[in-house]
C-alpha cells in the first residue's frame, strides 16, 4: 500500500486532481512531505516496525528530507521501547554533518539508558557498544548506567572492565542473576575477586540465598552443588541465621514447581527436606509437573489423607490425567513403614477410594476442566453408574469444552438444562451453541439470544434469532445497559436489536441509539 501511494503521488502542483486525494501533496508540497515523514516515523518507531522505518528512510531520506529535525526524539523513543535495530537504522542514515564525531542527538535521560541496559538490549549477541556510547552525552559510558542490570552479558562486560573490583555489594547481587543463567565460572570469579569476605558480609549471605533459589528454579544443578556445598552456605545453615530460616523449604518448593528432578534428589540427599504443602502441590499440578509428583509419591512425602485429597482435586480441576494416574498408584503398602517412622500412627491413604457420593463431585470437577480423557478415565474406574453428576454438561458447555460435552452426550446419562446454551452464548462459544441446538433440543432457549446480545456476541445472536420467531425485546435496558462491554460493542448491540426487533420497541423509548447516546453523555432519556 505504501508503494502504491508513493508511486501514484503527483510530483507537481499542476498535476493534482480537483478532488481530495492522498496522492495530491506527498511529492508536490514540501511541508506536507516533511509532516508525513515525521508522523509516519513516529508511528513506526512506537510500533517497533523495523521494515516500515527502513522503507521510510529509503524513500524519504534519498529526497533530502532533513532527518536531523526528528532524530533526537526518535532516538529517545526507540531507546525507551528497546528497539535496537531501529536505533541502528537511524544511525546508519544520519545526515552528513553527523558522520564525524559524536552524534548530535544524544540520550540525556538516565532512566532511558538504565531501562535499555536492564532489558538486555545491550548484550553481546546483538549490541553495538560503540553506537550505544555515541548516543550518550560526552563523558558517559553505557556501563555507568548498568548497576541495576540483570542481563548476564552486561554483567560479563562489567567484570571484564573491572567495574566490580571496588563494589562488593554489586558483585554480590549479580550472583543471583548469574545463577539463573548458569554462569558458574563467572560466579566463581566474582566471589574470588572479593575473597576473603569482610567480617560483615550480610550482602553476600542474602545473595547466596537468592542465588540458590534462582538455580533451583532454573534447573542448574552444577550451580546448586557449588552454592550448597560452599562453606558460606554450610556455616550459615548451621548457625541458623534469620536470612537462612526456611531456606531448605524454599529451595525444595522452587525445584518441585519447576520440575527439576535432579535438583530435588540432590536436595533430598544433602539436606533434610520439609513436608510438601498445598501451595507447592497446586503450582506443580497447574504446571503439569508429573515428574515432580511422581518423585514426591516415590519418596513418601504425601503423609496425610487431606494432603492427598487436595492433590486429587487440584489434578481434576486442571485436567491432569497423568498426575491422577500417579496418585491412583499410591497405596497403603508402599507407605506403611515410612509413615510409622514419621508419625505416631499410620495414616491410610486411599487410592481414589472415595466415600459414597464423592465420585459425582469428582466427575463435575473434571467436566469443568474440559478434559474428555479425564472424564473417560473416571467413568471407567471411579464413578458409579448410578451417579448423576447434575450440571456437568452445563458447566462444560459454559466453558466451551465441546469435546467434553460430546463425550458426556454419548457415554453418560446426565441431562443438560437450558443454562447450557445460555451460558455458552454468553461466553461467545458459537460452535457449542450450534452443537447444542442440533443435538440437545432440551437446551434450546431464547435466553441465549439475550445473553449473546448483552455480551456483544452478535454473530451468535444473529444465528439464533430466526430460530426463535417469538423472541421479543421487553426491555432495552435488559439487553444493553448494565453490561461490561465497551462503547463500540454496546452501540453495535443496539443497532442489531433495533434492526432485528424494531417492531417490539416501546414507543416511549424512541430510538435505541438515541437513548444510548443520551445515557452515554450523562443526559436523561425523555419519556
Image (cartoon, rainbow, N blue to C red):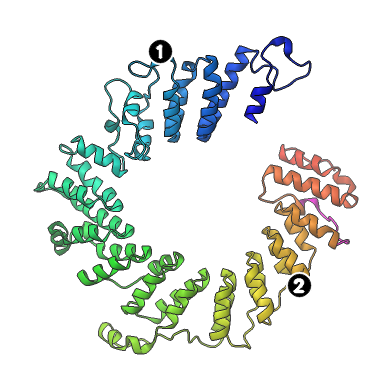
- Main secondary structure of the magenta stretch: loop
Going 33% across and 59% down the picture, which residue do you hit?
A: 217
Residue identifier under label 1 = 97
Provide the residue span drawn in magenta.
Answer: 468-477
Name the residue rendered at 31%, 40% in the picture: 149
Determine which quarter of the picture holds residue 81. top left
| Mark closest to the chain's N terminus, 2 or 1 | 1
State left or right for residue 199 relative to residue 361: left
Q: Is residue 271 above or below residue 107?
A: below
- Is any atom of residue 382 visible in this view? no
Instruction: Say if the magenta span includes residue 234.
Output: no
Q: Give the image location of residue 526, x and y in percent.
A: 83, 40
The image quadrant that residue 240 belongs to is: bottom left
Secondary structure under the numbered disc 2 in the rendered image: helix
Location of residue 448 (image quadrant): bottom right
Number of residues whose C-alpha sits closer than 10 Å to that of mark 2, classed few (under 14), some (14–19) or many (20 or more): few
157 left or right of 504 in image: left
Q: Nearer the viewer, residue 10 or 40?
A: 10
| Residue at 30% in and 62% down | 250
Q: Which residue is mark 2?
A: 439
Above or below, 166 relative to 207 = above
Quarter of the image with the C terminus is top right
3D distance between C-alphas at marks 2 and 1: 74 Å
Relative to 259, is 435 on the left or the right? Answer: right
Amino acid at each position: 500500500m505504501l508503494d502504491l501511494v508513493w508511486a501514484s503521488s503527483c510530483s507537481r502542483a499542476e498535476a493534482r486532481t480537483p478532488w481530495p486525494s492522498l496522492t495530491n501533496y506527498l511529492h508536490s508540497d514540501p511541508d506536507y512531505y516533511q509532516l508525513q515523514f515525521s508522523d509516519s516515523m513516529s508511528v513506526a518507531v512506537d510500533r517497533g516496525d523495523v521494515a516500515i522505518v527502513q522503507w521510510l528512510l529509503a524513500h524519504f531520506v534519498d529526497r533530502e528530507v532533513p532527518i536531523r529535525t526528528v532524530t533526537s526524539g526518535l532516538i529517545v523513543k526507540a531507546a525507551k521501547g528497546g528497539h535496537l535495530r531501529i536505533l541502528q537504522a537511524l544511525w546508519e542514515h544520519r545526515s552528513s554533518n553527523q558522520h564525524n564525531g559524536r552524534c548530535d542527538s544524544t540520550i540525556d535521560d538516565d532512566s532511558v539508558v538504565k531501562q535499555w541496559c536492564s532489558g538486555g538490549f545491550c548484550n553481546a549477541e546483538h549490541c553495538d557498544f560503540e553506537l550505544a556510547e555515541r548516543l550518550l552525552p560526552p563523558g558517559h559510558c553505557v556501563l555507568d548506567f548498568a548497576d541495576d542490570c540483570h542481563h548476564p552479558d552486561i554483567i560479563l562486560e562489567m567484570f571484564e572492565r573491572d567495574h566490580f573490583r571496588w563494589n562488593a555489594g554489586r558483585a554480590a547481587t549479580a550472583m543471583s542473576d548469574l545463577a539463573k543463567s548458569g554462569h558458574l565460572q563467572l560466579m566463581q570469579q566474582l566471589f574470588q575477586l572479593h575473597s576473603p569476605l569482610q567480617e560483615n558480609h550480610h550482602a553476600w549471605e542474602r545473595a547466596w540465598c537468592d542465588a540458590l533459589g534462582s538455580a533451583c528454579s532454573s534447573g542448574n544443578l552444577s550451580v546448586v552443588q557449588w552454592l550448597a556445598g560452599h562453606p558460606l552456605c554450610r556455616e550459615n545453615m548451621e548457625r541458623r541465621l534469620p536470612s537462612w530460616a526456611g531456606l531448605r523449604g524454599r529451595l525444595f518448593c522452587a525445584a518441585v514447581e519447576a520440575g527439576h528432578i535432579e535438583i530435588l534428589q540432590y536436595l533430598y540427599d544433602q539436606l533434610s527436606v520439609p513436608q510438601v504443602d498445598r501451595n507447592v502441590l497446586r503450582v506443580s499440578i497447574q504446571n503439569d509437573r508429573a515428574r515432580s509428583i511422581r518423585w514426591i509419591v516415590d519418596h513418601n512425602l504425601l503423609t496425610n489423607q487431606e494432603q492427598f485429597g487436595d492433590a486429587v482435586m487440584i489434578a481434576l480441576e486442571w485436567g491432569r490425567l497423568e498426575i491422577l494416574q500417579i496418585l491412583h498408584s499410591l497405596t497403603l503398602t508402599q507407605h506403611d513403614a515410612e509413615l510409622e517412622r514419621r508419625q505416631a500412627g499410620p495414616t491410610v491413604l486411599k487410592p481414589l477410594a472415595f466415600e459414597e457420593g464423592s465420585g459425582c463431585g469428582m466427575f463435575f470437577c473434571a467436566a469443568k476442566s474440559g478434559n474428555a480423557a479425564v472424564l473417560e478415565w473416571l467413568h471407567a474406574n471411579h464413578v458409579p453408574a448410578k451417579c448423576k453428576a447434575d450440571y456437568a454438561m452445563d458447566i462444560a458447555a459454559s466453558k466451551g469444552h465441546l469435546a467434553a460435552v460430546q463425550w458426556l452426550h454419548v457415554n453418560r446419562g446426565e441431562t443438560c438444562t437450558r443454562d447450557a446454551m445460555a451460558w455458552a452464548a454468553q461466553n461467545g462459544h458459537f460452535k457449542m451453541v450450534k452443537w447444542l441446538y442440533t443435538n440437545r433440543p432440551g437446551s434450546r432457549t431464547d435466553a441465549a439470544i439475550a445473553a449473546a446480545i448483552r455480551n456483544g456476541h452478535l454473530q451468535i445472536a444473529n444465528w439464533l434469532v430466526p430460530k426463535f420467531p417469538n423472541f421479543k425485546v421487553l426491555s432495552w435496558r435488559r439487553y444493553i445497559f448494565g453490561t461490561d462491554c465497551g462503547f463500540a460493542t454496546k452501540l453495535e448491540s443496539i443497532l442489531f436489536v433495533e434492526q432485528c426487533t424494531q417492531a417490539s420497541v416501546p414507543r416511549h423509548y424512541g430510538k435505541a441509539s438515541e437513548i444510548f447516546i443520551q445515557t452515554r453523555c450523562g443526559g436523561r432519556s425523555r419519556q
